[in-house]
Image: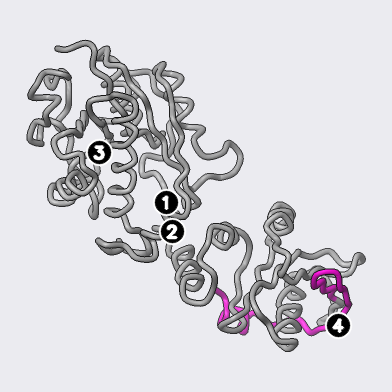
């Protein structure tokens, strides 16, 4: 085996990619881990995106590059060449984008091939032979992707045929059973990896519903995408919606995400309740309706609630009726 090879490993931080990283690094191949983050990662906010990838790359002892996918990712979500999965997940286009960036970094780093933790048959849209071949071709990585977990059920890639890697040390995994990976992780001493199934908000039905609404009735940009992750969302008109915080943390998040043109709603000081944001172009009637929606989630005992409304530098207090749950269910996004 040639010992001066260099590889780029796509590292989500999940189980499979962590194993692939360890298997390649253990062959003495110089390795750079590449981790992608976007607005659609299922980060809980406590550790931040990339924390699992940092942990495993430190454990293995390799360098880590974190790549933020921004507006370019929005473009493929809105117009995916190869379509969506079950919700709004453009899995094949997403993989092509990431693999293309990996190829560019491979070339910049003077590396020779790319490694992934893919398992044949594990993901219904992007991990079958035809999709894998398509992704390789459109990203410019044909014959240059090594998949240590399922290599022995695939045709050998160039690095395997040329002896740049030791193919005999790779595996023949297929399908969705994770038992072999969990055992291998234990053997390697890899602990505390995230849920094996991983996570992307684009596969979540509720988030996909909100995203479709934004794509058809709002400004599809990163700021508005971030707002989709917070609070209860209600579509009041084609041009106006209100977002109501569910707890103190979300109230703070809404305040941080507020834009200059937004309308802010909150109860008077003597009543506990949420912060709400009205975004878009709302009529006076829309604004009062939004105030009534926010009032529903206050602790006020009365059905009539005083709500403070701030629009730019202007502020006023209105008294509104709480909206009932049946109505809220009809307009909830």
* Location of residue 66 with respect to 232 vertically, above or below: above
Q: What span is in magenta?
A: 307-333
User: Separation of disc 2 and disc 4 at Cα?
Assistant: 40 Å
Upstream in sequence: badge 2 or badge 1: 2
**In the displayed structure image, the side of residue 225 where residue 175 appears, left or right:** left
| Circle nearer the viewer, 2 or 3 | 2
User: Separation of disc 2 and disc 1 at Cα?
Assistant: 14 Å
| Residue at 39% in and 37% down | 12
| Residue at 52% in and 39% down | 49
Upstream in sequence: badge 1 or badge 3: 3
- Of 18 and 8, the residue lying toward us: 8
| Residue at 52% in and 77% down | 217
Quadrant for the C terminus, please: bottom right
Pointer 3 local density, CA inside 10 Å: few below 14, some 14–19, many at least 20? many
- SS for tag 2? helix
Disc number placed over residue 200 in the picture, else none: 1
- Where does the image place residue 302, in percent across and percent down from the top left? 85, 79
* Location of residue 296 with respect to 170 vertically, above or below: below
User: Separation of disc 2 and disc 3 at Cα?
Assistant: 24 Å
Upstream in sequence: badge 2 or badge 3: 2
Pointer 1 local density, CA inside 10 Å: few below 14, some 14–19, many at least 20? some
Upstream in sequence: badge 4 or badge 1: 1
């Amino acid at each position: 085996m040639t010992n001066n090879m260099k590889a780029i490993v796509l590292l989500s931080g999940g189980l499979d990619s962590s194993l692939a990283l360890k298997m390649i690094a253990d062959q003495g191949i110089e390795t750079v881990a590449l981790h992608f983050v976007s607005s659609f990662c299922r980060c809980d906010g406590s550790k931040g995106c990339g924390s699992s990838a940092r942990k495993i790359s430190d454990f293995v002892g390799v360098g880590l590059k974190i790549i933020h996918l921004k507006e370019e990712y929005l473009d493929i979500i809105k117009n995916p060449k190869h379509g969506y999965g079950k919700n709004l997940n453009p899995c094949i286009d997403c993989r092509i984008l990431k693999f293309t960036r990996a190829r560019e970094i491979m070339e910049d780093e003077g590396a020779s091939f790319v490694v992934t933790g893919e398992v044949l048959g594990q993901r219904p849209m992007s991990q079958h032979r035809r999709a894998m071949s398509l992704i390789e071709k459109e990203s410019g990585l044909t014959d240059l992707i090594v998949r240590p977990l399922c290599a022995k059920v695939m045709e050998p890639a160039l690095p395997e045929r040329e002896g740049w890697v030791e193919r005999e040390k790779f595996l023949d995994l297929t399908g969705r059973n994770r038992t072999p990976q969990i055992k291998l992780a234990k053997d390697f001493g890899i602990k505390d990896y995230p849920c094996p199934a991983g996570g992307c908000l684009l596969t979540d039905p509720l988030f996909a519903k909100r995203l479709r609404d934004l794509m058809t009735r709002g400004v599809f940009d990163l700021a508005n995408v971030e707002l989709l992750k917070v609070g209860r969302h209600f579509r009041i008109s084609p041009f106006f919606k209100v977002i109501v915080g569910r707890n103190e943390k979300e109230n703070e998040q809404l305040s941080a995400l507020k834009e200059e043109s937004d309308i802010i709603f909150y109860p008077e000081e003597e009543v506990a309740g949420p912060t709400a944001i009205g975004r878009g172009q709302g009529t006076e009637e829309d604004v009062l309706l939004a105030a009534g929606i926010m009032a529903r989630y206050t602790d006020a005992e009365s059905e009539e609630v005083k709500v403070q409304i701030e629009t730019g530098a202007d502020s006023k207090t209105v008294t509104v009726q709480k909206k009932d749950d049946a109505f809220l269910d009809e307009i909830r996004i």
